[in-house]
Amino acid sequence: MAFNPCDSLSPSPPLPQSPLLMLPLDKGVDGHVCRFFSLEDRTALALRSFPATFSDSRCVGSSHGWLVLLDKDTEPYLLDPLRGGGRVLRLPPIETFPCVLPVLRSHDDNSCSSASSYEKIHRGCCRGTTHLPLLPLRDYIFFKAVLSANPNDDASGRSCWVVVIFGIESKLAFCRCKDFGGVGVWAELPGNNGPYSDVIFNGSTLFALCDNGFIEAWHFNREHPMKIMEIKSSFPRKSAEAAHALRSLCFTSTYLAEAAGEILLLVRFTGYFVNKHGVPVEEDDLLTEEGVRPVPCPYRTLYFHVYVLDMSSEE
């Protein structure tokens, strides 16, 4: 499916300041309904103009009120669901990624299904080339996507960048506003500390969290991104001790977030098995006297540790 690129975008009204949670799509009488839950007002906003084309899409990120979606053909798009009735911008095609070879399309003459049901794609990387249908490919290509600015804004929209974590090795790729409309290409960001687990923009600076504990800072206010800092962020001692004490009951994940201009490092503790009281337990502890295993709550978030990144130091 193709969309005509937007040649010009009008300024946008201000977005709600509190976060909105996107709920699963519902199919109503008038089409697909998208609902957003406001954490501040504790109310749900229903949008009945959500494009039916994206009913089977996968959301891989959201920034400045825009959703980054992969449609049923694994093509990436930006969708503005809250303003202007769902404006759409097409990102560079999936086959322009560094690890993707040209898409092979075939049709079943005896079927009236859409061509996407039979599309195949090659994914090439250092571990060899794997032949994948497009739907499973969505789980390999995009893990997270972020925008540096709102493409609708007059001042910053013209320099909007999109950065994604992609591929089996969790590398970084980017495109910019001039690549929108499906005419550009994705370029790999040549970082040295991958694989990457999270990315976030703060103004025109991208912060990328690496699995080895480093945080890279990249400046995007120019023709080509430039790395300006590498911060060695050793795992906080408090979190390390807690993770060690609960190592058989839970696992940890790390994220980046922004609050009041500060970059935060979040350590999330998730229990493997959690009882009805919210306490992490061993799987065998769930057995009753009759040997019946009640239904546990697996992979439940227990709590977070939150740290502020000190930009004055490179450690």
Image (spheres, rainbow, N blue to C red):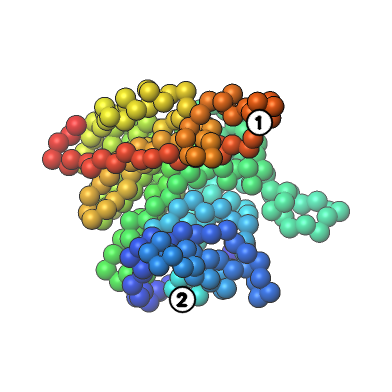
Identify which amino acid the numbered label 1 is placed on. Answer: Arg
In whole angstroms, how far apart are the C-alphas of marks 1 and 2?
A: 51 Å
Q: Marks 1 and 2: CB-CB under 8 Å?
A: no
Task: Identify the residue under disc 1.
Answer: 293
Q: Of circles 1 and 2, which is in front?
A: 1
Q: Is residue 65 rendered to the left or right of residue 155?
A: right
- As drawn, the residue found furthest toward the right would be 110
**Residue ID at (49%, 64%):** 36
Nearest the viewer among 242 and 13 is 242
**Residue 205: image tag:** none
The spot of residue 97 in percent (x, y) is 49, 44
How packed is label 1: few (under 14 Cα within 10 Å), some, or many (20 or more)?
few
Identify which amino acid the numbered label 2 is placed on. Answer: Gly
Nearest the viewer among 282 and 107 is 282
Task: Identify the residue under disc 2.
Answer: 84
Nearest the viewer among 300 and 16 is 300
**Residue ID at (47%, 63%):** 37
Could you say whether the residue bearing mark 2 is in a helix, strand or loop? loop
